[in-house]
Amino acid sequence: MAIRNIVKIDEEKCNGCGDCVNACAEGAIQIIDGKAKLVSEIYCDGLGACLGHCPMDAIIIEKRESAEFDEKATEEHLKQQNQPKEEPLVCGCPGTMAQSFKKDVPVEGSGGDVPSQLAQWPVQLKLVSPAAPYFKGADLLLVADCVPFAMGDFHGKLLKQKPIAIGCPKLDDVDFYIEKLSDIITQSGLKSLTVVHMIVPCCSGLTYIAKQAVEKSGVNLDMEDITISLEGEITNSQKLA
C-alpha cells in the first residue's frame, strides 16, 4: 500500500451515463447497477483522464492510501474486457442493452389518421430560438428524444397545447443545452417546465440540465419530472423544487 492519487466517485451524483468508462484507458471504471464504480485500485493510474468527461461532477482525485497501480495487471484486464461478450453494453450504459417488447394491442385510431398535437417547428433544443413566440408564458416540455417513440399516447397525454424542446443528455452538448435552456427561461417568461425522460440512468441527465438551467436563469419556476418506462408507461411523476 502507498499514499497516492486515485479516483473517487460520488455515487449520489452519478447518473450512470458511462462517459467516464469511455474516458478511462485502463478500464478501471465500469457501470454496475446503474452507477460508475472503480472496479479495482490497481487499474487506476490516478491521472484523472475521466474527470473532464463527467457531466455530473461526480468524480474527483483524492490522495489516500491505496494499492499501487499495476501496469501488467491492467494490460491483462484490458485483454479480458476486449473479449467478445453476449449483449455488450454500448458505451457502458445499461440503457443501451438490446431488448424486445411484444405488442399485441391494436394501435388506437388505426382505422384512420391520428392528428398530431405538434404546434411548432423546429423542436430540437439546438435549433429553437429563445425568442420564439410559442415559448411566451408557456408550459414548456423538455423531452428526451427517445420518449415519443416509446410512448404511444405521447401527443394526446403530454404534448397537447404545449411547446416542446427535445434533446439527448447522453449524446449532445450538456453545457450548450444548459445555456440555451436558461436563455429560453429568461427571455420567454415560462409558466412551468416539465422534463420527460426515459427510465434508463443516462437519460436522467435531462433533469440535471433543467435544474442547472433554472438555477442559472435565477427564475423561480414550477418544475415537474416525468419518467417513462421502456414500454412507454409513466413510472414516476414528481414536482421539483
Image: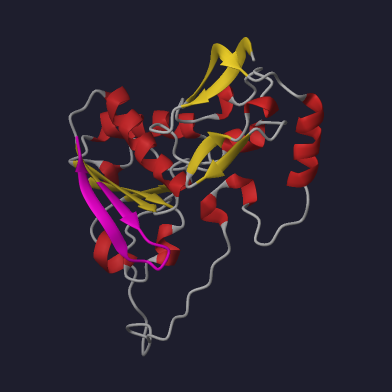
User: What is the basis of the colouring in this image?
Assistant: secondary structure
> For the point 37% across and 35% down, which residue is it?
208
* Displayed quadrant of residue 162: bottom left
Seen from the viewer's position, the closer of residues 4 and 112 is: 4
> For the point 37% across and 81% down, which residue is it?
113
> For the point 40% across and 44% down, which residue is it?
204
Q: Is residue 214 left or right of residue 192?
A: right
Q: Is residue 157 left or right of residue 199?
A: left
- Let me know if residue 92 is in the magenta part: no
Instruction: Measuring from the top left, give residue 229's x and y in whole percent.
Output: 38, 61
Seen from the viewer's position, the closer of residues 89 and 112 is: 89
Task: Establish if 47 lies above or below 155.
Answer: above
Seen from the viewer's position, the closer of residues 31 and 115 is: 31
**Secondary structure that dominates the magenta span:** strand
* Displayed quadrant of residue 189: top left
Q: Is residue 221 left or right of residue 113?
A: left
> For the point 39% across and 38% down, which residue is it?
129
* Displayed quadrant of residue 125: top left
Instruction: Measuring from the top left, give residue 123's x and y in whole percent.
Output: 42, 51
Task: Establish if 179 lies above or below 234.
Answer: above
Please state the extent of the stretch shown in magenta in the rendering: 225-241
Task: Establish if 187 lies above or below 125.
Answer: above
Work out which quarter of the rendered image holds the C terminus and state it: top left
